[in-house]
Image: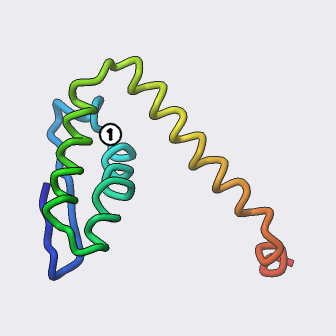
Amino acid sequence: MVVAVNDRDMYILTGYGLEGVLPDAAVNRIIREDITPLFKKNNYGAGIIAGVDALKTRLTADPEVLARADAQAASVVHNKVQTSYHHPYFYLLWQ
């Protein structure tokens, strides 16, 4: 995990051996849901701990459970994208 507080940027870099357990979508979700809310409150230490805990949870979880959770999270994101196209402003822009 690399955090550049002054640049307002962070990365979680995974190696080749962890790509299956920690895909980019899951890592981005950890950053978005676990770390960023605490960083926005200037609680950087708690954000890093929350991120490490979320990573540890994924690394020790049952792969089948992870696959179901990832599929569910992907469907939630997919549903949000689909519903955004039904917004009246979208139709205004494309008419």
Q: Amino acid at mark 1?
A: Pro
Q: Nearer the viewer, residue 44 or 32?
A: 44
Image spot of residue 24 (x, y percent): 33, 46
Is residue 8 depicted above or below 54 in this figure?
Answer: below
Quarter location, residue 66: top left
Query: In the image, 23: left or right of 4?
Result: right
Is residue 76 depicted above or below 59 in this figure?
Answer: below
Q: Residue at x 34, y 20 (%)?
A: 63
Q: Residue at the far right: name it.
A: 95
Q: Counting other residues with Cα less than 10 Å from the Cα at mark 1, is it few (<14), some (14-19), or many (20 or more)?
A: few
Quadrant (top left/top right/bottom left/bottom right) for the C terminus: bottom right
Q: Secondary structure at mark 1?
A: loop
Q: How many marks?
A: 1
Image spot of residue 62 (x, y percent): 32, 18
Colour basis: rainbow
Query: In the image, 88: left or right of 13?
Result: right
Q: Which residue is mark 1?
A: 23
Image spot of residue 70 (x, y percent): 45, 34
Q: Residue at x 37, y 58 (%)?
A: 32
Q: Residue at x 29, y 30 (%)?
A: 20
Is residue 28 depicted above or below 84 in this figure?
Answer: above
Image spot of residue 22 (x, y percent): 28, 37
Quadrant (top left/top right/bottom left/bottom right) for the N terminus: bottom left
Quarter location, residue 55: top left
